[in-house]
Image: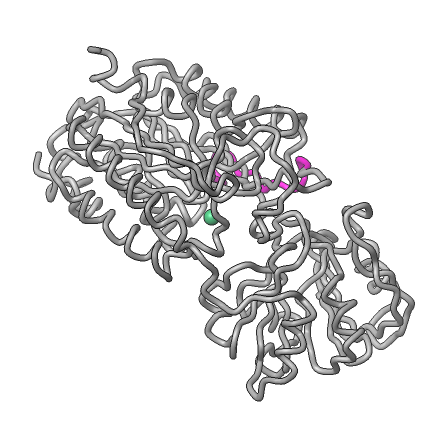
Amino acid sequence: MKRRTFLKGAATAALTSKMLRAGEGKRIAFGGIQIECSTYSGIRTRLEDFTVKRGQELADDPFFRQLKEYPYAFHPALLATAVPGPPVEPEAYNRLKTEFLRRLADLLPLDGLYLAMHGAMYVVDMQDADGDWIAAARKAVGEGCLITASFDLHGSLSRRAIDNLDMLSAFRTAPHIDREETAKRACDMLVHCLDHRIRPTLVWSPIPVLMPGERTSTVYEPAKHLWAQLPGMNAEPGVLDASLLVGYVWADEPRATASAVLTGTKPDLLEKDALSLAQEYWDARKEFQFKVPTGSLADCIERAERLATKPVVISDSGDNPTGGGDGDRADVLAELLRQNVRDAVIAGIADPPATEACYRAGVGRSLHLKIGGALDPRASKPVEVSAKVVFLLSTDNSRERQAVVEVRGVTVVLTARRRPFHEIRDFTVLSLDPSRFKIVVVKAGYLVPEIAKIANPNLMALTDGAVNQDIEHLPKSKWRVPSYPFVPDLHWTPSTIVGARSPRHAEA
Ligand SMILES: [Zn+2]
């Protein structure tokens, strides 16, 4: 079948295929686990921090709507997702894995499995947790089942993951605006291989370079041109998918590296493409730099105050919960107060006790609050202030509570759980208009498009925290393989590893 036919609309393919093979169904299951964990965080991700969807609720998830367009039913198992964050408690991981495997067992026999993964999960005292999950899934579904996976481009791969998968697709954009497309590529490839009885070859080239997402955004060079070549490569006959992954720098694990991964039917071509992507990524390693102005927290606030424009969006990058930071630090509040800034909003600080205290006090009341360090008191210090409650979000769910307080001209959003402020709506539901403020502080690294649009300009404060951007000075690694920039003069030439299930591997 020609590549073009394979790529045509899934709906049309569904119709044609249904007519051709009435009664000849394939059974496919889907599910997975998605979290990115900083091993530098002193706290833990618990079971209640995951959003778990299973059965019909997972089937009805709007993200997976597109699975209904394939000629075969995709049966929901379990999908656990969490805001990036600290290492996962082993009990939580085991509970989720056990239920996932039980649900997979109930769906057997299976022809295919789609694993929707992130790829940078860390479970306390367990290396390569994603590989563990994938290997367990393989054991459950058996050798005859084809497994496809989608990964975040900040995921890391391992020999175990590659040896248990048949194919893989990773996001091609950061900020991530191609989640659905990536899932579609992963599933198109699976259905294509099932339809044509193809066992694809999976070729992996690990690249010993570790960079934060903030230096590898695909909006900027050199990432822009590196990732821009993937669709062209993907269109070559014999290539089913071409992926390039940055990996995750705040993981002290041997598998933490960048990766080039190719899936397809022509092993020599896949190897050539993987080697060329890996070499180009390596050659560009010194060009991965911050593309927005950066500075110390004090510098960024001083600079923002001097600028005539507004709102100046300051990223509190070391405590970014969407990168795996704790999101509970009050360093920026302390510095804004020290510099007597009067027109700023901080969104937000995860502080369950302070949030609860505001709800107890009520709107319009003033109270004494200790803000910051509530989740990890050892990592940062609280700021003691007199605050006035100006808004309380109305919600029945105590974990969704958010309180807006004013502290000497600084507006602070306190939240009951770790959460990002990535959309304008995150502000407006709290009766806040971010464009009104001189300084808007968000716990973020690079800005997602909606906030980037209002930033006038954006300054990235290189703050302390579990995802500190000053990666060259991260605590000494125990497990990482030698990589750039940790070993600045590292010598390296690319090589490839072929997945154990690949036909060429079996013949060798
Ligand atoms: Zn990511």
Point out residue 165 in the picture as x, y percentages from the top left corner: 35, 25
In the rendered image, which quarter contains the N terminus?
A: top left
For residue 208, above or below residue 180: above
Depth check: give the residue in front, 195 or 211. Answer: 211
Give the quadrant of residue 92: top right
Q: Is residue 380 left or right of residue 156?
A: right
Q: Give the range drawn in magenta.
A: 46-59
Point out residue 497 in the picture as x, y percentages from the top left corner: 31, 24
* Scheme of colours in the image: one colour
Point out residue 100 in the picture as x, y percentages from the top left corner: 51, 26
Point out residue 26 in the picture as x, y percentages from the top left corner: 26, 25
Q: In this view, does 59 lie to the left or right of 455?
A: left
Question: Is 100 part of what is drawn in magenta?
Answer: no
Is residue 74 visible to us here?
no
Q: Is residue 75 left or right of residue 463?
A: left
Depth check: give the residue in front, 264 or 362. Answer: 264
